[in-house]
Image (spheres, helix red, strand yellow):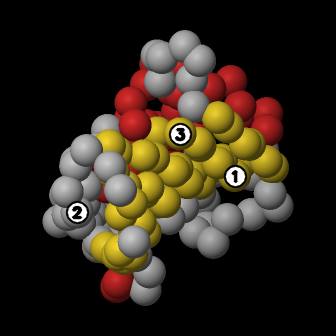
Amino acid sequence: MRRTLDNPPTVAAPFGDRFAHVARVDLPGGALLMLAGQVAVDDDGHLVGPGDVVAQSERIFEIVEGVLAGHGAGLADVLHVRTFMTDLGDLPGYAGVRRRLFTAVPPPASTTVEVSRLFLPGALVEVEVAAAVTGRSAA
């Protein structure tokens, strides 16, 4: 078993490289990818879509797709989505984005919780995912 912490070049480095975007565990026949929580920031770390949960959700999944792509994976490889929201009243907007992106039946396993705040002022949602890729060599 090989473990790798990585910030792939397919996305901007997270806030001065203070954490890894992805933890990868290579196993016989594939790999498990555990992504760090992502918030809606541009490549310079500025909040995208202030006050707009749909815009923030779309940006978050753009980042998630970029991180996954850096390891030969895509949204179809996602096993679990964990979501933190500052207001569950925003759930319909977020859920609409999720439904558009995850079309498989059934969709990935999911956990969604409301939190009092996120680390980035103005962030309405933060998303973590776990994905599995099969038959691909280590990145």
41, 34: nearer the viewer? 34
Left or right, residue 6 beside residue 93? left
Residue in view at x 74 percent, y 51 percent:
86
Q: Which sits earlier in the primary sequence, circle 1 or circle 3?
A: 3
Residue 60 appears at what percent x and percent y?
44, 47
Report which quarter residue 138 is drawn in: bottom left
Q: Secondary structure at mark 2?
A: loop
**Which amino acid lies under the numbered mark 1 shown in the image of this protein?**
Phe
Vertical position of residue 94 compared to residue 4: above or below = above
Quarter of the C terminus within the rendering = bottom left
Residue 12 in view: yes
Residue in view at x 40 percent, y 37 percent:
77
Eye-nearest disc, 1 or 3: 3
Vertical position of residue 110 compared to residue 66: above or below = above
How crowded pointer 3 is (Cα within 10 Å; few <14, some 14-19, many 20+) is rated as some
Q: Marks 2/1: CA distance? A: 30 Å
Q: Marks 2/3: CA distance? A: 19 Å
Residue matched to label 2: 138
Residue 95 appears at what percent x and percent y?
62, 26
Q: Which sits earlier in the primary sequence, circle 2 or circle 1?
A: 1
Residue 83 appears at what percent x and percent y?
65, 47
- Count numbered badges in the picture: 3
Quarter of the N terminus within the rendering = bottom left
**Which amino acid lies under the numbered mark 2 shown in the image of this protein?**
Ala
Eye-nearest disc, 2 or 1: 2
Residue in view at x 71 percent, y 31 percent:
91
What label does residue 79 carry, if any?
3
